[in-house]
Image: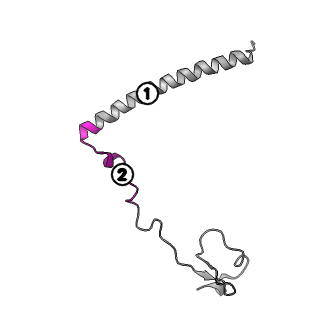
C-alpha cells in the first residue's frame, strides 16, 4: 500500500477540481444549447419558462384570525405553531374567542 504525501494529495485535488470545472463548463454549454433550441422550436418566452411568483394560490400569505385570547393581557394566538406560554398546559376552551 502506497501512502501519498499531503502535497501530492493537494496537487491531485487541484487537478480534479480543474477537471470538474472543465466538465461543468462543457455540460452547461450543451444544456444551454438544448434549452435555446427548445425555446426557439416552441416559441417560448421567459414568462413561459420562468413564471413570476405572483400567480400563487389565493390563500398564500393571508393572515389567520386568532382563535384564543388571554383575558389577562389581551394577547391572542391563532392556534397554529408553538403555543404561547400562557396557554400551555391549560384547557384551551376557556381562552376561545
Q: Secondary structure at mark 1?
A: helix
| Residue 12: assigned label | none
Q: Is residue 35 magenta?
A: no
Residue at 39% x, 31% y is 31
Does 67 sit left or right of 26 as displayed? right
The residue that appears at 58% across and 75% down in the rendered structure is 78
Quadrant assignment for the N terminus:
top right
In the picture, residue 56 is in which quadrant? bottom left
In percent of width and height, residue 21 lies at 52, 25
Residue 75: where, in percent of width, then height?
64, 80
Q: Which residues are magenta?
A: 39-56
Gap in Å between the C-alphas at discs 2 and 1?
Answer: 25 Å
Labels 2 and 1 touching (C-beta < 8 A):
no
Residues 90 and 74: in front is: 74
Q: Residue 51, percent across and down?
A: 36, 51
On screen, residue 42 versus residue 9, left or right, reads left
Q: Which mark is residue 51?
A: 2
Up the image or down, 41 lies above or below 89; here it is above
Q: Is residue 47 magenta?
A: yes
Quarter of the picture holding the C terminus: bottom right
Q: Residue furthest front?
A: 73
Residue on which the image places disc 1: 27
Task: Give 72 or 56, whichever is nearer the viewer.
Answer: 72
Task: Specify few, some or many for label 1: CA neighbours under 10 Å numbering under 14, 14-19, or 20 or more.
Answer: few
The residue most toward the top is 2
- At x 74%, y 12%, the residue is 2
Amino acid at each position: 500500500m502506497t501512502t501519498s504525501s499531503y502535497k501530492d494529495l493537494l496537487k491531485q485535488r487541484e487537478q480534479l477540481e480543474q477537471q470538474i470545472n472543465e466538465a461543468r463548463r462543457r455540460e452547461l454549454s450543451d444544456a444551454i444549447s438544448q434549452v435555446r433550441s427548445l425555446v426557439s422550436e416552441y416559441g417560448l418566452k421567459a414568462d413561459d419558462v420562468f413564471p413570476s411568483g405572483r400567480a400563487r394560490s389565493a390563500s398564500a400569505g393571508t393572515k389567520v384570525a386568532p382563535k384564543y385570547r388571554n383575558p389577562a393581557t389581551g394577547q391572542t394566538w391563532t392556534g397554529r405553531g408553538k403555543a404561547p406560554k400562557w396557554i400551555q398546559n391549560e384547557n384551551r376552551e376557556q381562552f376561545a374567542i
